Image (spheres, helix red, strand yellow):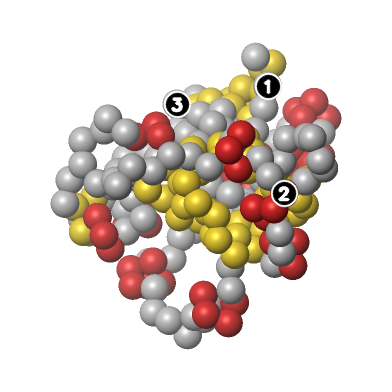
Amino acid sequence: MEIQPIAYFRSPLKTKFGVPRQSGIANSLNGYIVMEKEWNNSECLRGLEDFDYLWIIWGFSANVDAPKHATVRPPRLGGNRRMGVFATRSSFRPNNLGMSSVKIVSISTSPGKQIKIEVSGADLMDGTPIYDIKPYLPEFDAHPEACGGFVSSEKWTSLYVEIPDDIRIQLGEERSLLVEQLLSEDPRPHYHDNPERVYGMIIDEYDIKFKVIENTVKVTNVHLL
């Protein structure tokens, strides 16, 4: 079976560094599902406006040529323990497929124009191919009583984020909130713990530099690309 993208995702996150590790973590992160020509037809989305959430089936396009292994080191376990790849949501998967639940913000289906679905909370980088979308059904898809394995037992500690006032003004309040949400989840590789190391995360046209000192992220400066 061969599958082809039905759409591509447009996001302010231009590289995979800084992309949330799970959908729904950064609810102020908005992006667009932009339909491909063959599916740029409002009839394909008829009735979708009545749903609040979507499932997106997409491709880990930045990992296509990466080696795949039977076990991986989940960030939630600090990179110290291995789990089977199918017991995790690792991006290094045999078929490079991901699945995310996102909130529908708006649907643009004006005749003669590009059809776009605006969503929030996606964990996809800009340019990600999308292979299918399906409505989220709370009656069947939500299982709040379910056990979440090691994810439930190993709690993730969010970091405190410090953004200087002058940088907040430069970024604007909405983008500053997005930066806080993304950095609070610690986008660094799990094996990095050097308080002097400066990292960079690209959001839209901004390259945001930061350090992590103990449990605090300090945004140091911002450059326009």
Q: Position of residue 211 (x, y in %)?
A: 53, 32
Identify the element where label 3 is drawn.
loop
Image depth: mark 3 or mark 2 in front: 2
Q: Position of residue 177 (x, y in %)?
A: 73, 44
Which amino acid type is marked by label 3? Answer: Arg
User: Marks 3 and 2: CB-CB under 8 Å?
Assistant: no
In the rendered image, the residue lying farthest to the top is: 225
Which amino acid type is marked by label 1? Answer: Glu
In terms of sequence position, does the residue under pointer 1 or pointer 2 come before the other?
Answer: 2
Q: Which mark is residue 197?
A: 3
Pointer 3 local density, CA inside 10 Å: few below 14, some 14–19, many at least 20: few
Image depth: mark 1 or mark 2 in front: 2
Image depth: mark 1 or mark 3 in front: 1
Identify the element where label 1 is drawn.
loop
Tag 2 residue:
42
Q: Residue at x 65, y 14 (%)?
A: 225
Q: Is residue 151 visible?
A: yes
Q: How many marks?
A: 3
Q: CA distance from mark 1 to mark 2?
A: 31 Å
Identify the element where label 2 is drawn.
helix
In terms of sequence position, does the residue under pointer 1 or pointer 3 come before the other?
Answer: 3
Q: Position of residue 122 (x, y in %)?
A: 58, 49
Pointer 1 local density, CA inside 10 Å: few below 14, some 14–19, many at least 20: few
Which amino acid type is marked by label 2? Answer: Ser
Tag 1 residue:
205
Q: Is residue 151 above or below residue 190?
A: below
Pointer 2 local density, CA inside 10 Å: few below 14, some 14–19, many at least 20: some
Residue 217 lies left or right of residue 75; in this view the side is: right
